[in-house]
C-alpha cells in the first residue's frame, strides 16, 4: 500500500474511533460518513472507496468500512 492510502486509512480509523462511542453503530457509521463527505476532498474519498472495493478495506476498522461503503462520489 502506498503511504497516501495508509494515511487515509489512519484518518478514517481515527474518525471512526470518535464516533464508535455511539452505541448505535448505524448512527456511528452515518457520523463517520458525514464527516468524510464534509471534510475530505473528492480525490481522497475516491481513493478510500477504491481501497475498500479492491483490497476489501484492509486496515480499516469495521465501522470505517461500513461508513466508506456508504460514501457517494
Image (cartoon, helix red, strand yellow):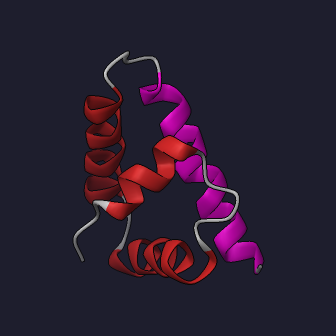
Residue 2 percent location from the top left of the image: 76, 80
Q: Could you tell me residue 25's position as x and y percent?
A: 36, 29
Residue 5 placement (x, y as % from top left): 65, 72
Residue 67 in picture, x, y percent from top left:
37, 51
Location of the C terminus (image quadrant): bottom left
Query: Which residue is nearer to you in this view: 1 or 39?
Result: 1
Could you tell me which residue is drawn at 61 percent across and 54 percent down?
A: 60
The residue under the point 67% across, 62% down is 7
Look at the image and tell me in which quarter the N terminus lies.
Answer: bottom right
Q: Is residue 33 magenta?
A: no
* Left or right of 60 in this view: 68: left
Q: Is residue 8 above or below residue 4?
A: above
Asked if residue 9 lies left or right of residue 49, the reply is right
Residue at image point 47% right, 26% down: 20
**41 left or right, relative to 8:** left
Q: Nearer the viewer, residue 46 or 60?
A: 60
Q: Nearer the viewer, residue 48 or 70?
A: 70
The residue range painted magenta reads: 2-20
Total number of numbered discs in the rendering: 0
Magenta-drawn stretch, dominant element (helix, strand or loop) = helix
Q: Is residue 47 above or below residue 21?
A: below
x 63%, y 77%: residue: 55
Amino acid at each position: 500500500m502506498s503511504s497516501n492510502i495508509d494515511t487515509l486509512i489512519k484518518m478514517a480509523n481515527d474518525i471512526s474511533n470518535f464516533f464508535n462511542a455511539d452505541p448505535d453503530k448505524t448512527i456511528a457509521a452515518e457520523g463517520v460518513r458525514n464527516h468524510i463527505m464534509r471534510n475530505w476532498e473528492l480525490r481522497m474519498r475516491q481513493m478510500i472507496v477504491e481501497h475498500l472495493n479492491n483490497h476489501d478495506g484492509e486496515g480499516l476498522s469495521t465501522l470505517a468500512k461500513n461508513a466508506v461503503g456508504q460514501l457517494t462520489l
